Amino acid sequence: MTASLTTPTLLTAAGTLIISALLTPVVRALLVRFRVFDVPNARSSHTVTVVRGLGIAVWAAMLIASLAVIGAGLLNIGVFGAVFGAVFSTAGSGASAAGGSWLLAATLFAVLNLTVVLGLIEDLRGLSVKSRSALQLLAAILIAVLLVALASPPPLAAILTVLFGIPFISSFINVANFMDGLNGISALHGIIGGVCFWLLGTHLHSPALAIAGAITAAAFLGFLPWNLLGYGFLGDVGSYLLGTVLVSLSFAALLAGSPLLAAISPLVIYFGDVGWTLVRRIRRGAKWHEAHREHAYQRLQQLGMSHLTASAITAGFTAAAVALGLLSAVWQGPLAFAVLLAGGSVILLCYLNLPRLLPAALPAVFPKKQR
């Protein structure tokens, strides 16, 4: 990315943050009016009824910012005109190829919002497990195929990438939903993941990845203060948004030439927490699909920590994984990969074992503050 992109990217991020922050109380008022509440259940870490669905504000902020940037590119306005003319170029040349590229990009943009609409329906009226799973799988297939079509790798690489991408994308959408159980945890994760892809896109000279990362970080940052004040939760619309955006950016980063460790680094802690919790439940003979509060982040909060403390610890481990991942973008080679992979594994293992290893006196240090 050229230096000239720094100012427009930062301005876009600033606008996204302001829109997200201003829309959140407006959306909350509407949700209260229509009585969209989250009632505590077997997987909840809160004890009182809370407004859910505030992810609509984050989603709206990201939509407005993305459409503004894409529109500026289509209309050839300012620096974005040159940027997005190259971002969505595919194999071939001429007007027909350019038109096909924009059609692919527009279709991908629409599909990225499919799972968010799915989450909104889940918040408002609910869906059967089969319907939800089928639609998530369909979205993952479309996202993987469209991203590969935009990148235009060789045929064999394209097939293998799609086969890998479908379970990768569909899994993380659910993972993000499972991990959205404490005030601040998803917002912090969105901020860290967005910053990661912003920096990675800058390093890879990929304006689309950098701008998308900046928009993501800013949108969740605008929501964070309201979430910490206890105004409400993202809801499924917000957690599906988080999962879809971050895993799609991870997949896009791989296709843009990112090292594997850098591309997956924002997802490692979340994937590890959900995966290890699933393994523990299966080994114990518990029904893996039943609601529970056995994730590492939930067990940290159950030790007596406030929501913010437990969320900050989880976010801190994600930030550490991201730091190693970004280092892999500049320190490369077999030795570097082995060292950084080992370091990431240690970070994940430390996080997963933290609830068991923390001293029994910890509740006296972190008084319990459930919301």
Image (cartoon, helix red, strand yellow):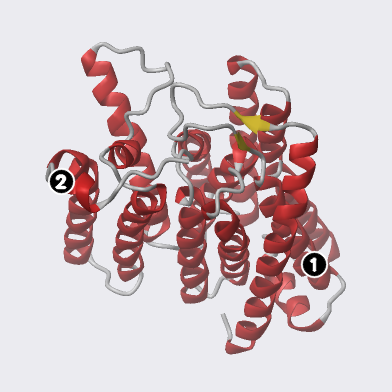
Residue 292 visible in rendering: yes
- Position of the N terminus by quadrant: bottom right
SS at circle 1: helix
Q: CA distance from mark 1 to mark 2?
A: 47 Å
- Give the label, 1 or 2, closer to the camera: 2
In this view, the residue in front, 264 or 313, is 313
Residue named by callout 2: 358
Residue at position x 42%, y 16% from top? Answer: 290
Residue at position x 52%, y 51% from top? Answer: 246
In this view, the residue in front, 169 or 299, is 299
Picture coordinates of residue 114, whole percent (x, y): 71, 38
Residue named by callout 1: 68
Residue at position x 62%, y 63% from top? Answer: 222
In this rendering, would 335 be left or right of 221?
Answer: left
Residue 96, quarter of the rendered image: bottom right
SS at circle 2: loop
The amino acid on which the numbered mark 1 sits, given as a three-letter code, is Ala
Picture coordinates of residue 328, whole percent (x, y): 31, 67
Which of disc 2 and disc 1 is earlier in sequence?
1
* Relative height, residue 66 to residue 231 (above, below): below
Residue 92 visible in rendering: no
